[in-house]
């Protein structure tokens, strides 16, 4: 059985590293923004219970991020490193990974029960923010949501 650790965080310098055994759940008051967030835990990943914004860098070292119904927004020029088939951003609910996409390939390292990354390119366009999530089912006759 996995040990669950609940953390109440607020960041003063914007750089936070999760280094714990077990699963971690991120709680916070108000908006949650980090310059750099490093996930280096043994377990399934960091569960979000609040929308999170990353200003500079998200590093997945030994686990991923589980969005639930929360959004993870990456700021302009921010990066994501370390995603692979065992550590990625899990879109298991209504939450989305939101990233700016301009005229270069941008990887959305997402999946639900497995890793299904998406690459977007806003060919010739200026940067716009796109949100993405994966579901473990085929949807037919789908239109844009909101």
Image (spheres, helix red, strand yellow):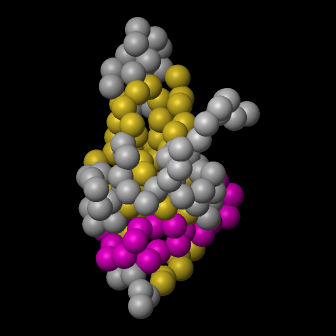
- In the displayed orientation, state which residue is furthest to the bottom: 1
The total of numbered circles placed on residues is 0
72 in magenta: no
Residue at horizontal 40%, vertical 71%?
Answer: 44
Could one spot residue 36 in this view of the protein? no
Q: Quadrant of the C terminus?
A: top right
Question: In this rendering, is residue 63 above or below 8?
Answer: above
> Which contiguous range is marked in magenta?
23-47
Residue 13: percent from left, percent from top = 44, 56
Say whether residue 136 is left or right of residue 115.
Answer: right
Residue at horizontal 44%, vertical 77%?
Answer: 23
Question: In this rendering, is residue 82 above or below 118?
Answer: below
Could one spot residue 129 in this view of the protein? yes
39 in magenta: yes
Residue 139: percent from left, percent from top = 59, 41
Residue at horizontal 50%, vertical 53%?
Answer: 136
Q: Quadrant of the N terminus?
A: bottom left
Residue 74: percent from left, percent from top = 47, 41
Q: Nearer the viewer, residue 114 or 99?
A: 114
Q: Nearer the viewer, residue 143 or 49?
A: 143
Residue 131: percent from left, percent from top = 54, 37
- In the displayed orientation, state which residue is furthest to the top: 124
- In the displayed orientation, state which residue is furthest to the right: 146
Say whether residue 42 is left or right of residue 8.
Answer: left
Q: Nearer the viewer, residue 91 or 25?
A: 91
Residue at horizontal 47%, vertical 35%?
Answer: 99
Principal secondary structure, stretch drawn in magenta: strand
Say whether residue 107 is left or right of residue 26.
Answer: left
């Amino acid at each position: 059985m996995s040990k669950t650790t609940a953390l109440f965080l607020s960041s003063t310098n914007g750089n936070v590293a999760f280094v714990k055994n077990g699963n971690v759940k991120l709680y916070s008051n108000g908006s949650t923004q980090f310059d750099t967030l490093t996930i280096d835990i043994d377990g399934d990943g960091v569960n979000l219970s609040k929308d999170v914004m990353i200003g500079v860098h998200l590093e997945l070292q030994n686990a991923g991020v589980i969005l639930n119904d929360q959004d993870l927004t990456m700021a302009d020029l921010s990066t994501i490193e370390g995603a692979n088939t065992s550590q990625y951003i899990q879109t298991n609910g209504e939450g989305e990974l939101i990233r700016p996409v301009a005229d270069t390939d941008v990887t959305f390292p997402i999946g639900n029960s497995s890793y299904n990354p998406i690459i977007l390119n806003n060919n010739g366009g200026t940067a716009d923010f796109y949100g993405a999530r994966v579901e473990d089912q085929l949807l037919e006759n789908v239109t844009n949501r909101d």
